[in-house]
Amino acid sequence: MAARPLLRSTAATSAPFSSSLSTSCRATSRALRSTLIPFLRPPYRFSGLVGAPRLRPRLSVSLVRAMSSSSVGGFEHSTGPGSLQSQQTLSAGRRRGSVGCPSMVVAALSGLRSAPTSLDDHPFPLTLDYGGPIMRYADGVVDSYFSRYITVREDHRKSSLNPTTTIVAIDLKSRKIEDPKILISGSDFYAFPRVDPTGRKVAWVEWNHPNMPWDRSELWVGYVSDDGDIYKRICVAGCDLHVMESPTEPLWSTEGELFFVTDRGNGYWNVHKWVESNNEVQAIYTLDAEFTSPLWLFGIKTFDFIRKGRGSSCLACTYRQKGRSYFGLLDVVNSSLTLVDIPFTDIRSIIARGRYVCMEGASPTVPLSIGKVILDENCTRAVDFSTVWSSFNSSLEYMSCISTPEMIEFPTEIPGQKAYAYFYPPCNNLYEADPEEKPPLLMKSHGGPTSEARGILDLSIQYWTSRGWAFADVNYGGSTGYGREYRERLLRSWGIVDVSDCCSCAEFLVDTGRVDSKRLCIFGRSAGGYTALACLAFKQIFKAGASLFGVVPPSQARAIYKALKMRGLPVALVEYEDEQHGFRKAENIRFTLEQQMVFFARVLGNMQVVDEISPIHIDNFD
């Protein structure tokens, strides 16, 4: 029996920003509980940040058939330095502005004089209430020496578009609510305030416009006076204008040594150590792999100390290399790395205590989960691995319907240059495809644009592959996870390199006989939505596409829609009230996914969607 694209349920989309991720998961879960295939549930993601404000009152999704002109009604192809800088500025401000807690409260802080004495005690405020998200706090740590909480603060009192960011200290010695003391100020952005074991040194990361933190940042250490102020500062890494680097993730050992990750030298984020006596930086282990991820979220932690009771000579760490995560034990004395075999091929964050290491991870067949590794007495190998929590506990039951990705390497337009993607073939044990028929392709251009496709069990992808579609998740030039040279391919070329690589990937899949050349579609979220529209406007590869909460405001989305309508191209525009950058409401998530498939099936022709779904009106088509 010939397979054909089916439509029986909806699936999840995950937010590209950290704001209200738990809300997104709950909404997606509600959407999926109403579907007909029970195994489709959302891939959850944890975030330590709460209280995020909504970014826009109205967001839209655009569905269009391929365009051929270099401009559409005034929507010009702009990729110069100015447009890139504007995007960087917007992303930096949005990253900060989309996270944080409008007021700080505490329920229990052990060892502090004013800490509650039981879990029954009510939380009490530590900071002033301004009646809204005017002050926002994130990425804080307890300073037990001075009985205070050191955190990043974003102050919107003077400007909501360009708020003032500082590192502040919140007093924990009494319940008197006062304005926090400003410890560090002067730069546009701050992250990772970390206090050493003595309480007399503080490390932090800072950067300024127009840089993103993965372009250029600085790691500083401040010395703390008896009254708790910073009286001296030393730049550890990032201040040499002749060295392009982006230090991140400072972490103090129990002996007071500062470790961190930076990409100096080989262009990959590797673990380094600061030698305080002569203010030098030493590489602990050099590898063409990324030991951290871009600072899209506060609180990233990809390495931690183990054996703290007997000295901090070993680090539990994770790194990414060629599209896969690895977990290992890094001996910082002998500069040796021992890999530990675990079921996860994608690891986001880790935390270690003694011989126990917990991590957030996944794989092509394991949904996003929390795993626990128990190491042997010498902390040299794993003796046990268990899943503490999983976003979906029945994946093995439906393995026959799960498409596992193939990591592909394809040539770009530049001779000798390669780019990468995950290719998911159609998979459904209830149907057999006609051997003479190639499947349609849906290509995803990820957001960011400096994000990364991860190749894990994503049920929104399985939604398509279980219904006869092939799916490609592209890591175009500019994606993170492949070193500085790779992510800098997009500098001053956004809208060129990403578009070219997506088209090259589609052509590669056609040339290798994997997909039907006449049924190629593309979509993207956020910055990926811009890439999808640019592919349709300036190339002749894709037949149709969708832009979900792209990087333009709603007014420009309407202008694009009107221009396409006037040109006679099949187009539809859907706007949702009270949505965010990353749809949150279950009904909107479901409706968007269903209408994408219906739209593609209709405009491509000769395809049938079997579910009873009322299609939206398509201008210049219906």
Image (cartoon, helix red, strand yellow):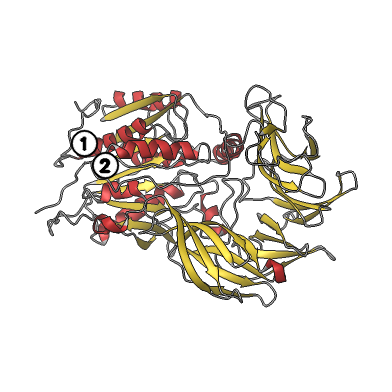
Label 2 Cα neighbours within 10 Å, binned few <14 / some 14-19 / many ≥20: many
Mark identifier at residue 590: none
Report the amino acid beneath label 2: Lys
- Classify residue 255 as left or right of residue 494: right
Q: Position of residue 263 (x, y in %)?
A: 63, 60
Q: Quadrant of residue 424?
A: bottom left
Quickly name the residue at label 1.
Answer: 603
- Classify residue 250 as left or right of residue 11: right
Q: Position of residue 163 (x, y in %)?
A: 68, 31
Q: Position of residue 469 (x, y in %)?
A: 24, 49
The quadrant of the picture occupied by the C terminus is: top left
Secondary structure beneath disc 1?
Answer: helix
- Classify residue 407 as left or right of residue 217: left
Q: Position of residue 65 (x, y in %)?
A: 28, 36
Q: Which of the two discs, 1 and 2, sits closer to the camera?
A: 1
Secondary structure beneath disc 2?
Answer: loop
Quickly name the residue at label 2.
Answer: 543
Identified at 46% across, 40% down, the residue is: 15
Q: Quadrant of residue 504?
A: bottom left
Q: Is residue 553 visible?
A: yes
In the image, is residue 511 above or below residue 193? below
